[in-house]
Image (spheres, rainbow, N blue to C red):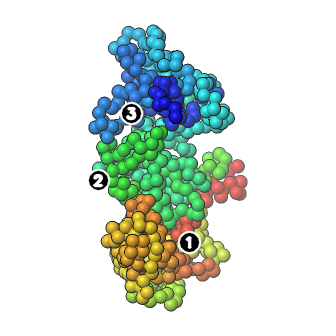
């Protein structure tokens, strides 16, 4: 049996480096965080060969006193925390004091620094098996420069796992992108092989912040983003969320920051997915740049080696706050909010157009009326009441076909299509007058699409998808008005579960009852389902309960019943909406447009498909070579 021995300082640091230093991007992240913690207003990063040959990070922060330099490259030496109370309320990006020691153990590192009250700078390096610090004088302005050369030169096995120079640089570029999004008050410069890749000035105003985001995330993101800001219960959430029409095939444009620290958290991801649930197309991902500000004492950042994960003291409160804020922001989106993105996308699809002789020059781009303005147009579409005020609308007529479900009955017939009432055709506004965002209907195409015109151009509406969303939102409101009623099962369903699941169902009995589920524990590993929501009488009861319990275990709460209920309502709305080849009159088409302008999430149907699109006058001019 080998004897227990104390590891050498270098070997101990190399072991720690296995968790902290994964690739050049990890080194850059740690060094930039140190620079930001030092109060830097400017951070310059220089790389060679993707960061493998050289990483140089220079800042104009407070600097490090010469007397502290011997400890700067030692393990567990930091100026950011001193006691356990400091650790439980960390307000800086770094705090462990092991990054520099770990980096220096797998590279050739030198640190040069000067404080404002020093006449000259000093440089520190470590060498030898015991990593003794060697200090020498140097020339340097106030601030710090860290040079990391020949990364993993003494650990060949780690170096073999590095990818190509381009791949490693892309990881560094993404790391700098995150840091630049987290700190608008600092400027960043990134050079690779003597070439400037990024040059970002400090951004103080909202316009400057949007410019930085557009340079890092793309102009299309800003054109299709909604600004949000909410504060409640000591939490503040602000930032930009993209419209559902600007979805991605992968989750590559999702940035979430907690007190300035970029994180990847399952609780946050679940809250965002839940907010986008019924407005995204299949397998699409939302895009967002969001900032959550909380009391540092209520969040634990010391739960992951790379500090990419955090743990909230009250995770449920944070989850509900994020979900409700995003859910409300997406619900408040109206067609007018889509116009900036639609117009910008249209302009990006066309070359420059001469202003002389172009018919579109005579028509200024409409900014669209606000929902309150658009709702002043009365509606005669379907059985709906006027869109203003929308909250006064009663859904008893629309919901009559499934109200029997709450009494224990089943769906006996499909809801018949809405009746349409004729009304005079609205007069298009004159110059200078307000017009509704979706303009006025002029024709119906193949019994499927509604063609509308506005000062901006031509708007094409999928009438079935649009009516489906309108019906779906009204049914959801009606369900809230009538409450979710339960239906007793004639024969209770018995489920064999684990002891953990059985205990969870027993402890969350009241919450499950609010969801319409009455579940009793009749054995150590057995549950009996005695009541289920009346609307879900045809659903797979066993699978539904198991999914609810799985959500409770993972997230502390479950929205599974609501999701399944909304899925059923979506199916009913689909069957109850106007079908293709239904010939509508002009007033009926205009009524549908007005309802869209007053309905939440009307830009997408229940399945995430867009309900309307815009073709600007300049695009139409391009088709016919007008103004060329």
Measured in 3D between alpha carbons, the distance from the residue under mark 1 to the one under mark 3, in whole angstroms, is: 53 Å
Residue 319 falls in image quadrant: bottom left
Q: Which mark is residue 520?
A: none
Residue 305 in the image: state x and y as whole percent.
46, 39
Residue 317 in the image: state x and y as whole percent.
34, 56
**Does 459 sit above or below residue 95?**
below
Q: Nearer the viewer, residue 182 or 574?
A: 182
**In the rendered structure, which disc, 1 or 2, sits on the residue that comes first in sequence?**
2
Q: Secondary structure at mark 2?
A: loop
Residue closest to the far front: 1
Q: Secondary structure at mark 3?
A: loop
Which label lies toward us, 1 or 2?
A: 2
**In the rendered structure, which disc, 2 or 3, sits on the residue that comes first in sequence?**
3
Residue 535 falls in image quadrant: bottom left
Q: How many marks?
A: 3
Q: Which mark is residue 95?
A: 3
Q: Looking at the image, which residue is at 59% across and 26% down? A: 151
**Does 580 sit above or below residue 414?**
above
Give the class, few, some or many, for how many residues have Cα within 10 Å of label 1's Cα (few <14, many ≥20).
Answer: many
Q: Nearer the viewer, residue 412 or 358?
A: 412
Measured in 3D between alpha carbons, the distance from the residue under mark 1 to the one under mark 2, in whole angstroms, is: 38 Å
Residue 180 in the image: state x and y as whole percent.
48, 36
Q: Secondary structure at mark 1?
A: helix
Residue at which label 2 appears: 233
Q: Looking at the image, which residue is at 57% across and 34% down? A: 23
Residue at which label 1 appears: 465
């Amino acid at each position: 049996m080998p004897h227990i021995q104390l590891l050498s300082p270098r070997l101990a640091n190399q072991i720690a480096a296995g968790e902290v230093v994964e690739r050049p991007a990890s080194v850059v992240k740690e060094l930039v965080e140190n620079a930001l913690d030092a109060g830097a207003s400017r951070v310059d990063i220089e790389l060679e060969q993707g960061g493998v040959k050289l990483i140089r990070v220079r800042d104009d922060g407070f600097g490090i006193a010469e007397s502290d330099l011997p400890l700067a490259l030692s393990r567990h030496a930091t100026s950011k925390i001193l006691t356990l109370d400091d650790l439980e309320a960390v307000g800086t990006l770094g705090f462990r004091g092991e990054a520099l020691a770990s980096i220096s153990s797998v590279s050739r590192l030198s640190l040069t620094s000067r404080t404002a009250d020093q006449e000259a700078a000093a440089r520190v390096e470590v060498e030898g098996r015991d990593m003794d610090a060697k200090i020498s004088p140097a020339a340097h302005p106030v601030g710090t420069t860290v040079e990391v050369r020949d990364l993993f030169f003494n650990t060949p096995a780690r170096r073999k796992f590095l990818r190509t120079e381009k791949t490693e640089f892309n990881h560094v570029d993404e790391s700098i992108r995150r840091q630049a999004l987290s700190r608008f008050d600092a400027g960043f410069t990134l050079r690779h092989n003597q070439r400037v890749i990024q040059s970002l000035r400090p951004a103080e105003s909202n316009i400057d912040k949007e410019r930085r985001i557009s340079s890092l995330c793309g102009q299309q993101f800003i054109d299709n983003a909604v600004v949000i800001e909410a504060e409640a219960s000591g939490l503040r959430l602000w930032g930009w969320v993209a419209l559902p029409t600007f979805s991605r095939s992968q989750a590559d444009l999702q940035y979430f920051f907690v007190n300035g620290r970029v994180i990847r958290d399952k609780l946050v991801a679940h809250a965002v997915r839940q907010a986008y649930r019924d407005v995204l197309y299949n397998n699409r991902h939302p895009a967002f740049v969001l900032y959550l500000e909380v009391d540092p004492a209520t969040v634990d950042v010391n739960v992951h080696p790379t500090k990419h994960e955090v743990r909230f003291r009250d995770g449920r409160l944070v989850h509900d706050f994020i979900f409700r804020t995003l859910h409300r922001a997406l619900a408040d989106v109206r067609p007018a909010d889509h116009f900036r993105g639609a117009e910008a996308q249209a302009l990006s699809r066309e070359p420059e157009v001469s202003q002389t002789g172009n018919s579109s020059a005579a028509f200024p781009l409409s900014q669209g009326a606000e929902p309150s303005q658009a709702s002043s147009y009365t509606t005669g579409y379907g059985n709906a009441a006027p869109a203003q005020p929308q909250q006064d609308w009663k859904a008893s007529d629309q919901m009559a076909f499934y109200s029997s479900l709450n009494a224990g009955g089943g769906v006996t017939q499909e809801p018949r299509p809405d009746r349409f009432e004729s009304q005079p055709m609205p007069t298009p506004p004159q110059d200078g007058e307000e017009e509704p965002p979706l303009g006025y209907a002029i024709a119906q195409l193949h019994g499927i699409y509604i063609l509308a015109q506005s000062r901006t151009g031509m708007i094409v509406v999928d009438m079935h998808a649009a009516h489906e969303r309108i019906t779906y939102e009204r049914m959801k409101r009606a369900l809230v008005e009538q409450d979710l009623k339960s239906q007793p099962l004639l024969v209770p369903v018995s489920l064999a579960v684990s002891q953990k699941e059985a205990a969870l169902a027993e402890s969350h009995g009241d919450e499950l009852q609010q969801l319409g589920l009455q579940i009793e524990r009749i054995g150590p590993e057995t549950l009996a389902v005695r009541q289920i929501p009346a609307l879900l009488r045809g659903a797979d009861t066993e699978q539904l309960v198991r999914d609810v319990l799985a959500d409770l275990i993972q997230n502390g709460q479950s929205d599974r019943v609501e999701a399944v209920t909304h899925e059923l309502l979506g199916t009913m709305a689909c069957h109850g909406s106007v079908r293709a080849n239904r010939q509508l009159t002009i007033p009926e088409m205009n009524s549908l447009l007005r309802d869209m302008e007053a309905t939440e999430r009307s830009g997408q149907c229940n399945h995430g498909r867009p309900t309307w699109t815009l073709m600007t006058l300049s695009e139409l001019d391009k088709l016919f070579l007008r103004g060329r």
